[in-house]
Image (cartoon, rainbow, N blue to C red):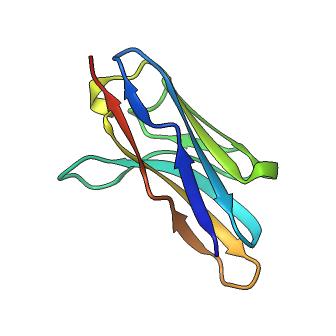
Amino acid sequence: QVQLLESGGGLVQPGGSLRLSCAASGSISSISTMGWHRQTPGKQRELVATITSGGTTVYADSAKGRFTISRDNAKNTVYLQMNSLKPEDTAVYYCNANIKPRFRSRGDYWGQGTQVTVSS
């Protein structure tokens, strides 16, 4: 069974940094695009950044210049380095990935979410 496990969230002061990690585990043949989304209460989940298996990245305007997405294909892991954090970055951050399991059809998978709180 394929799972995505996030880590690295927490409480940070404005201007601070956090690094989120998300590791895919299970019986996996291949992973194409991986990404991060975030959601606050009462709002729709929004894209933060994505990265293809070849390293092509896409960022939301709110993340450009402050966040960096990267991945380690050998470890099936995607990272989100967040710098210059602002209170409006406070949200639950979700990892997602498009995965081809060994014995199942390709599909989109989501992690359980990790809370990021930016507050003094």
The percent coordinates of residue 95 (x first, y second) are 51, 53
31 relative to 117 in the view: left or right: right
The residue lying at 76 percent from left, 79 percent from top is 102
The percent coordinates of residue 47 (x first, y second) are 42, 49
| Above/below status of 39 relative to 25 | above
| Above/below status of 108 relative to 58 | below
- Where does the C terminus fall, quadrant-wise? top left
Q: Quadrant of residue 69?
A: top right
Along the viewing direction, whichever of 33 and 85 lies nearer the viewer = 85
Can residue 19 be seen by looking at this rendering? yes
Can residue 54 be seen by looking at this rendering? no
The percent coordinates of residue 103 (x first, y second) are 74, 85
Along the viewing direction, whichever of 80 and 23 lies nearer the viewer = 23
The residue lying at 77 percent from left, 50 percent from top is 75
The percent coordinates of residue 112 (x first, y second) are 45, 58
The residue lying at 64 percent from left, 52 percent from top is 23
| Above/below status of 105 relative to 70 | below
